[in-house]
Image (cartoon, grey):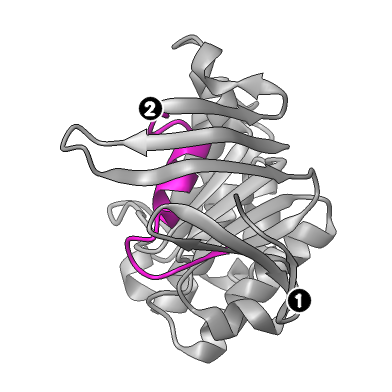
């Protein structure tokens, strides 16, 4: 599903956010990406949906070398990736329903299919009774669930999440992880970046640890199962 081959991401200042990373994430897997702030987690995610491009090496997603994608092909790549952000990135001049429906509209779905799919997705995240609220009226945890619904309404094969529990308390964080785990159980590949090591270690999913732009280990259930390059 995702392959990094000796990838480096270097900014114009010379700072290397990602350093010679090689990594393979199989289809249908669930991995955490952990490390302190500035370790390179967000940069890894940005490379996957080509918000950033490697300075060296190659990134392959679903068999496609991202450097070989044309500008026309890029939207097709992104339609197959659900992205969840820590700060939600919701539109506060639209209802919850409209925020989620917009993802389907942009993807070009049949307008007649959109209302039913949006309602089902919002019900799956426990927001069926709040679909016509403005997001500003919701709690932080509810807004994050709207963001999850928006990222998954198109049933993408891959979901990546950048600190989706960072603004939430532990209990709500566990609920968000449970929702993502349920998606994984349906066959979705999930990569979740977090600095919350305790939360990542609770589920037993493999944990990829980053430090200063490099992978320093891959762990499961507090036991080393491999090491990074």
Q: Which residues are magenta?
A: 33-54
Which residue, given by chain and number where applicable, does mark 2 sit on? 55
Query: What x and y, as percent, mark residue 133?
Result: 42, 66
Query: Does residue 53 sit above or below 142 in this rendering?
Result: above
On the picture, is 87 further left or further right than 66?
Answer: left
- Few, some or many residues within 10 Å of mark 1 (<14, 14–19, 20+): some
Front residue of 218 and 194? 218
Query: What x and y, as percent, mark residue 208?
Result: 61, 62
Front residue of 10 and 81? 10
Residue 54: which quarter of the image? top left
Does residue 155 appear in the picture of this structure? no
SS at badge 1: loop
SS at badge 2: loop
CA–CA distance in space, label 1 to label 2: 33 Å
Query: What x and y, as percent, mark residue 228?
Result: 62, 55
Which residue, given by chain and number where applicable, does mark 1 sit on? 204
Residue 22: which quarter of the image? top right
Q: Count up the numbered dots.
A: 2
Q: Who's the residue at 68% across and 40% down the image?
A: 156
Does residue 3 appear in the picture of this structure? yes
Front residue of 67 and 218? 218
Q: Who's the residue at 41% across and 74% down the image?
A: 166
Query: What x and y, as percent, mark residue 77?
Result: 58, 26
In magenta stretch: residue 41: yes
Query: Does residue 29 sit above or below 1 in this rendering?
Result: below
Q: Quadrant of the N terminus?
A: top right
Q: Who's the residue at 69% across and 46% down the image?
A: 117
Q: Nearer the viewer, mark 1 or mark 2?
A: 2
Q: Who's the residue at 66% across and 32% down the image?
A: 112
């Amino acid at each position: 599903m995702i392959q990094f081959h000796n990838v480096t991401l270097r900014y114009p200042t010379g700072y290397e956010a990602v350093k010679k990373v090689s990594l393979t994430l199989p289809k249908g897997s669930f991995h955490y990406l952990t490390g302190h702030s500035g370790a390179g987690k967000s940069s890894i995610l940005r490379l996957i949906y080509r918000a950033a491009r490697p300075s060296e090496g190659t990134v392959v997603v679903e068999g496609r070398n991202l450097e070989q994608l044309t500008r026309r092909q890029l939207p097709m790549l992104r339609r197959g990736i659900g992205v969840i952000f820590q700060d939600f990135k919701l539109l506060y001049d639209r209802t919850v329903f409209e925020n989620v429906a917009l993802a389907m509209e942009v993807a070009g779905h049949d307008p007649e299919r959109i209302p039913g799919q949006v309602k089902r997705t919002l019900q799956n995240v426990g927001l069926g009774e709040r679909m016509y609220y403005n997001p500003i009226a919701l709690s932080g945890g509810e807004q994050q669930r709207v963001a999850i619904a928006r990222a998954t309404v198109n049933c993408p094969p891959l979901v990546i999440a950048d600190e989706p529990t960072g603004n939430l308390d532990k209990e709500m964080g566990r609920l968000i992880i449970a929702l993502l785990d349920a998606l994984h159980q349906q066959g979705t590949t999930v990569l979740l970046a977090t600095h919350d090591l305790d939360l990542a270690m609770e589920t037993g999913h493999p944990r990829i640890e980053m430090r200063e732009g490099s992978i320093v280990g891959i762990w499961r259930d507090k036991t080393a199962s491999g090491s990074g390059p």
